[in-house]
């Protein structure tokens, strides 16, 4: 082989070796770059999974709303490697967004005025306080705009692309932001945002896609947290109502008392957990016995509180006068200042004299008592004037509410009831009515007071035929022994 050929061969081998070194180095650099990208993706996934895990733990522990809101913002900052974040939630139908968590270093994402900016120059904490209190109108600024359009935005320059019309703060300069809507189904929950220094952290398209995914997961978790907390609050309210119901039942008579020469039976059936009706038995002396039935307008907690007040006031005044009208007048004057204008109490208070068989009663706007006469088998309405308790301060009430007295003969049966009986409405919209009550009373009175009460309840139940009663039902039957 010639010398020239040998030289060419050596040069070829040297070039081949150099090419091999270059290719190997490039492959190594490529592998290193791919490994770094894979590590970054794995780290990002770990941050995302860690965030979702922490959020799920917080929800399962029924943490406070503030703790969940903070976790969402700090988790979004951690996943996207951002320096700041903010969470704004919609305030019902008010059309505004309320800041629920703003991180300490968050740049202003809302409109500022000159005074706020001037205060921030002398007191850095004043700006953060302003941001944590400032609501955002839907459509205003980048936060309001994202909420209104329901489209996420990536702003490379917050100050230039934010659409602010007011004064600016230095923290808004050289700042990049990602803002996304939080929506669950058709429910617009609010807006989530993260921010970073544009010179140190440039959000890529991949970062934007990760942020959008994070916003979707946050909205789902937030909706679950809201539902979880609402259910927890509902359980607490239900427990409190059950406790209140038990207390209210304690205020009702434990049973029907034994009265020489008379039989009395009473029953209260609440339409809801708490009742706006009540009845009571009040022993006055050796021969006199007081009976009261009342119906507070409205239902629920307010009505239940009024019944408790009414019971206490009436019991404390019952022994002070032999006149039922005078007792009700005292009750009215004491309760009127504490009853809302849209509420009142219809009631009947009667005093039975067992020695004479005479009944004296006063009717404060209540349904007429019914008296079945054993001798004639006829039902009479005991009509007397009277104004409901709580409507008038006292002058008119005392002028129209008077005592009415009558004697009960052996076998006679007196029925007191609230309008939950006569106004019970079936699926066709028909009411049970007073005439049906009278017929039932006439049919059942020969069987006794307890048969009247239980039989009327059964009749109303059959009439409703599974329809839930919209009002409380209370009945008292008083019968003189034959």
Image: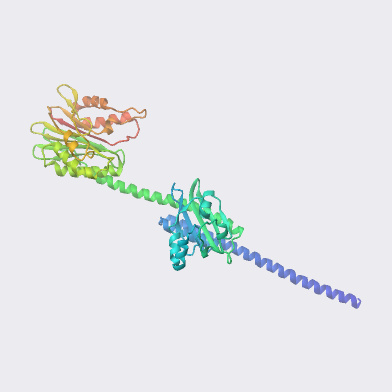
* Relative side of 410 to 67, left or right: left
* Relative side of 283 to 221, left or right: left
Protein image colouring: rainbow
Q: Quadrant of the N terminus?
A: bottom right
Which residue ends up furthest to the front in the rendered image?
114
Which residue ends up furthest to the top in the rendered image?
376
Asked if residue 184 is positioned above or below residue 168 in the image, the reply reads above
Which residue ends up furthest to the bottom in the rendered image?
3
Q: Quadrant of the C terminus?
A: top left
Residue 233 in view of the camera: yes
Judging depth in this view, the residue of 432 and 100 nearest the camera is 100
* Relative side of 11 to 192, left or right: right
Asked if residue 146 is positioned above or below residue 401 in the image, the reply reads below
Asked if residue 380 is positioned above or below residue 75 in the image, the reply reads above
Residue 95 image position (x, y, % from top left): 46, 48
Residue 50 in view of the camera: no
Q: Picture quarter containing residue 439? A: top left
Count all numbered tags in the image, as a single digit: 0
Residue 315 image position (x, y, % from top left): 16, 43
Which residue ends up furthest to the right in the rendered image?
2
Judging depth in this view, the residue of 179 and 80 nearest the camera is 179
Residue 316 image position (x, y, % from top left): 15, 44
């Amino acid at each position: 082989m010639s010398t020239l050929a040998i030289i060419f061969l050596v040069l070829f081998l040297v070039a081949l070796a150099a090419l091999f070194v270059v290719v190997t180095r490039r492959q190594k650099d490529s592998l290193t770059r791919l490994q770094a990208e894979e590590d970054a993706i794995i780290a990002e996934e770990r941050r995302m999974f860690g965030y979702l895990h922490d959020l799920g733990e917080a929800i399962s522990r029924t943490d406070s709303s503030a703790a969940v809101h903070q976790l969402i913002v700090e988790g979004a900052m951690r996943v996207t490697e951002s320096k700041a974040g903010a969470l704004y939630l919609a305030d019902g139908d008010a059309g505004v967004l309320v800041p629920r968590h703003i991180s300490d270093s968050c740049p202003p994402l809302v409109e500022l005025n000159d005074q706020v900016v001037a205060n921030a120059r002398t007191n850095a904490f004043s700006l953060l306080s302003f941001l944590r209190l400032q609501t955002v109108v839907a459509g205003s600024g980048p936060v309001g705009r994202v909420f209104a359009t329901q489209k996420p935005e990536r702003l490379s320059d917050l100050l230039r692309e934010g659409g602010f019309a007011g004064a600016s703060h230095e923290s808004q300069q050289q700042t990049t932001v990602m803002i996304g809507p939080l929506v669950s189904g058709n429910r617009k929950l609010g807006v989530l945002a993260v921010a970073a220094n544009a010179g140190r952290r440039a959000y890529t398209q991949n970062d934007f896609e990760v942020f959008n995914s994070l916003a979707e997961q946050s909205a789902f978790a937030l909706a679950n947290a809201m539902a979880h907390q609402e259910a927890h609050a509902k359980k607490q309210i239900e427990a409190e109502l059950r406790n209140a119901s038990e207390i209210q039942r304690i205020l009702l008579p434990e049973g029907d008392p034994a009265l020489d020469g008379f039989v009395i039976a009473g029953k209260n059936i609440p339409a809801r957990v708490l009742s706006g009706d009540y009845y009571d038995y009040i022993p006055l002396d050796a021969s006199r016995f007081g009976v009261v039935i009342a119906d507070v307008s409205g239902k629920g907690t307010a009505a239940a509180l009024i019944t408790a007040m009414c019971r206490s006031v009436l019991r404390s005044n019952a022994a002070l006068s032999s006149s039922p009208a005078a007792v009700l007048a005292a009750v009215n004057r004491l309760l009127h200042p504490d009853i809302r204008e849209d509420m009142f109490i219809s009631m009947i208070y009667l005093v039975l004299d067992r020695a004479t068989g005479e009944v004296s009663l006063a009717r404060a706007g209540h349904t007429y008592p019914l008296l079945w006469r054993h001798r004639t088998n006829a039902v009479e309405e005991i009509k007397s004037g009277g104004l409901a308790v709580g409507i008038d301060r006292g002058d008119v009430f005392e002028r129209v509410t008077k005592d009415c007295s009558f004697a009960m003969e052996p076998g006679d049966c007196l029925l007191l009831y609230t309008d939950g009986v006569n106004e019970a409405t079936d699926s066709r919209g028909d009411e049970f009515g007073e005439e049906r009550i009278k017929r039932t009373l006439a049919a059942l009175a020969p069987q006794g007071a307890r048969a009247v009460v239980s039989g009327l309840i059964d009749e109303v139940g059959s009439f409703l035929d599974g329809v839930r009663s919209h009002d409380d039902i209370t009945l008292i039957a008083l019968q003189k022994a034959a």
